Structure formats: C-alpha cells, structure tokens
Amino acid sequence: MKKISAIILILCAGLGTACTDALMEDSKTKITTDWLKTTPEGLESMVIGLYDYDRKILRDYGSGGDGELFCALMFDYSTDLLVFRGGSAAALARLDGLTASTNYFKYMWSHHYQIIGKANEVIYAAEHNLDMENSTVRKAWAEAKVFRGRSYFELYKRFERLYLNTVPTTVGNLDRVFKPSSKEAIFDLIKDDLNDAMEVLDWTDQPGRWTKAVAKHIRAQVAMWEDDWTTAIDQCEDIFESGMYGMMDNAIDCFTGADLNFRENLYVYQYSANIGGGGNASGGNVSGHRLSLVTTSRYQKVTGMDFSVEYGGYGWGRCYPNTYLLGLYDQEKDKRYQNMYRHKWYYNDPDNLPAGKQLGDEVVEKSSAEYIECLHPMSLKYADSWTRLESIEATYGFKDVVLYRLAETYLMAAEAYYHRDGGSSPKAIEYYNETWERAGNDHFDGPLTMDILLEEYARELNFEGVRWPLLKRLRMLERVTLHGGDTPEEDPRLVEDRSLTQQRTNFQPKHYVWPIPQSEIDFMGAANFPQNEGWL
C-alpha cells in the first residue's frame, strides 16, 4: 500500500457523488468496464482507488484548495490552541467573513459525499454481484463500510444536517428528493457500518489500509458523541488487549521519519515520491503535500540563516502553538515541551552573519514581525527533514501523515471511565497516566477532572485534528474566546495585532455547525433541505 499502483488514476475518475458534482453527470461515462464491479480483483481495485482519493484532501493546496481545508481540520483552527499568522484558510482560522458560499465548506461536503458514493458502489456490488463468502470480496466490502461510516461521521461533526444515501448513483435514480435525516438514523448507519467492518477486518494489514483497530477506534469516537461510555470503553480496551499496538517511548517518535508506520500509529496516510505514492502527477513529477511548509517557521528569511535539513527545509510560518498551549507543560519535567516543538534557532549561514555574530549563536528577533513569521516556536509533528533532502528548498514533501494513534485511544478511555465511574476511577487514572507519565511527569494519583483531561488532550494531541471535534462534543468551543491566538500580554514578544486574536471576538454560537454549501442548497431546494440556523 505504500506504493499504490497507477490504476488509481483510472478509478478516481468515478468518485463524483456530491449533489452538484455528480448527480448532474451521467455516471455511465465514469467507468466503462464491468470488471471493476463483477470480479473480486476489480472490487479490490475500486477500494484502492478510494484510499488514494481520500488522500486528495491533503494535496490540492493553493487557490483555496482541499489541502488548505486539511490544514484547518488538523491544525486546531478556531480552537484555543492555535496562533494563526496568515495564509491557509484564513477565514476559517479567524472565523471571519464565512458564508454558505465559502469554498471550504463545499470541499468538505463534496469530498466525503464522493467517498460515500463510491463506497456505496463497492458495498452494493459485493452484496448483489459477487460471492460474499470470497475473502477478497468480504474485505473490500468491509473497507468500503469504514469509508462510508467514517465519512458520514466526519460530515456530521461539522454539518449535522445530512441526507443519507446507501445506494449507488445511476442514471435511473438521479431524480430524487433530498430530505435531512435524523441524528438517530445517521448514527445508526455509522454504527452499523463500523460494526460490520470490525467483524471482517484483521487487526493489522498493509500500511495505509483500514484495520479492525481503526474501525474500533472510530467506533469509540462515535460512542463518545452519544455519551455511550461503556461502548467507548469496550472498543478502546479491545484495541489495548489485542496485543498488536503499543505506545512509543516518546510522543514525538510517532512523527519522526518519513515512514510513520509505528506500533502506536493506528492509521497513517502513506506518501512517497513515486507515482501512486501520493500527490498530483504533472510532467512526470509527484507533488506530495505541504503540511510541513505550513507549520515550519520561516527561519530562512532571517539574515544569517539558510535552509537547513535540521530545521525542516522550507517554511512559511503560518500556524503555531499558542502561549496557552505551551504554558500547559511543566517545562522541567514534561519532555513534550522540548521534543514536540522547536523553540530556538541558531545562525547557520557563514556568508551572511550579522555583525558581531558567530555560527551557532542563538538567533534573537529584531522585531515582533520577524518573531511571528520566522522565529516563533513551531510544532515538529509535521516537520520534514527526511523527504526533501534532494531539494531542501522544495515546497512539497512526502512524509507520512498520522490520522489516528493509540494515545487518543487511551485518553478517550480515560475520559469515558471518568464520565461513567467518576474522577477517582482507577481505570480512568491508569489510562490517563499512559500519556502523562510517558512524557516524564510524576505518576498522577487523581482524582481526574474534565479540566485535567482537556489539558492532557491538548498537550498530547494538538495539531492532530482532535481539538475542534472534542470541544464541540463537550459544548466548549467558546474556549476560543479565552485562548484563541495570542495577545502581547500573553506573549510579550508580540505587538498588538488583532489578526492574532480575531477569532476571539468573531466567535458566535452558529460556529458550532458549519453551513450547508450554498450550491448544494440551491440544487436540493431550500424548501426540502433548509440551511443550518444562523447561516446565509
């Protein structure tokens, strides 16, 4: 799976099923051979195409592309943990000028409904055209079930108001009436899909493919959204007891290297510089993704500094951990404070040293502007010192991207026991200590509180796409009004700049739910499918 074959280039042409992107098209023109839907090998190939399409959300970066949406989803935009300097998906980061016509909402909606549409085709073909006793067919069916269940779950987190579609889109069923489905119906489908998948999938597989562990991890997430603490605990503990996964020595180890298929990482987007290894192919080149570029400080702009493998190559310096997040660590004991962030830079360009400076001297900013752009503490989770060695100035990289890891499973289990059995629950405290003690902190004896759990979620899982859904689930998104961005009082190295805290004043209750893309409302009809409250 690390090197997905070029067949994906053919398969992905058939992934359109969002209302305006697909239902207006003749699906008969998409894939012209019956082989894909009438043979086990063809069905497996369709699923491989789904894996590649799912990665598309990372790589189409620029001009407001999907890759910018992925930054917003993963880098704690609009939460209490981020300093946003500028660039990628600024409107989402600052909650500024957002409308139902903002492209990012359409990207999210279209991306997942397209996955759902192709998953429907796989599921239907397996159940109606092929032998479900065939192991290849059953596995493809189960993988498609994860794709569909996960996509509906991701859509629900952001939009809530969804339509359910479980049949392939054909010329014969293009004329349909769209009605919002109930939360109960949405969650029933998600749970059924994940439950079906985990009965078939193995605990491990080729890197980059769904496993029983991933299905159970997502199923635990779903249970947390339903306050079904016992189910969440059961799913998490099944993963712990499988013996197939374990914690790394340090959290940063999960993000160190180009190949991140470690025992703690339950699911990793696979990347390589080969065709089929992720990214757009143009002129024989594969572009990869730009996550490192966005999170790496723009140190190379400082006089006396040059591009460096050690510092992660080219950086734009757009998204940083804020003072609130960095202040949550015990700087003396908690190893994460030092090894998950870069705090300092040292002169490395002998030909351009400022007067009185020597190689290896610590760089000190000359202005607040230079600090926020070039020398602000940065996250190392996406820093790439491995895949851009041939061209250290390259703006794209091929480092794998972690989507789910065991640290979150442990913290979900700790929280579930806390809600069910109280803050003194021995199991809640045991699971909390998995990440807390690993970081070098003294054993925590309890009792737990929700604030303690929230802080550990932040210390461990920042910049991993966990914070916004967590705060929404707990009805705590208002925390962005307290800690979003930074002020000069919080970080004395800054001067007054409202753009660094704009999200605090822009936040409104409507931001708990994203607007249905206006193009979709127009297509489905507002009378049948009304817009989410508060959005125009």
Image: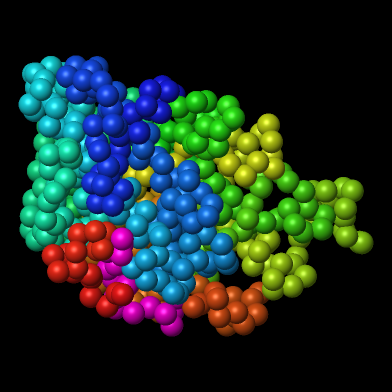
| Left or right of 96 in this view: 350 | right
Residue 363 location (% of width, % of height):
76, 60
Residue located farthest toward the right when viewing the structure as drawn: 355
Residue 499 location (% of width, % of height):
55, 76
Picture residue at 19% right of the left edge, 64% below the top: 525
Quadrant location of the N terminus in the rendered image: top left
Quadrant location of the C terminus in the rendered image: bottom left
Residue 35 location (% of width, % of height):
23, 18
| Left or right of 233 in this view: 62 | right
Picture residue at 44% right of the left edge, 74% below the top: 97
| Left or right of 262 in this view: 149 | left
Most foreground residue, 345 or 132: 132
Picture residue at 34% right of the left edge, 79% below the top: 508
Give, as a single range, the part of the protein colored magenta: 503-519
Give the quarter of the image for residue 102: bottom left
Rendered view: 240 above or below 353? above
Give the quarter of the image for residue 86: bottom right
Residue 55 can be seen, yes or no? yes
Residue 325 location (% of width, % of height):
47, 66
Rendered view: 114 above or below 128? below
Most foreground residue, 131 or 529: 529
Q: Is residue 508 magenta?
A: yes
Q: Is residue 273 magenta?
A: no
Rendered view: 490 above or below 3? below
| Left or right of 336 in this view: 124 | left
The colour style of the image is rainbow
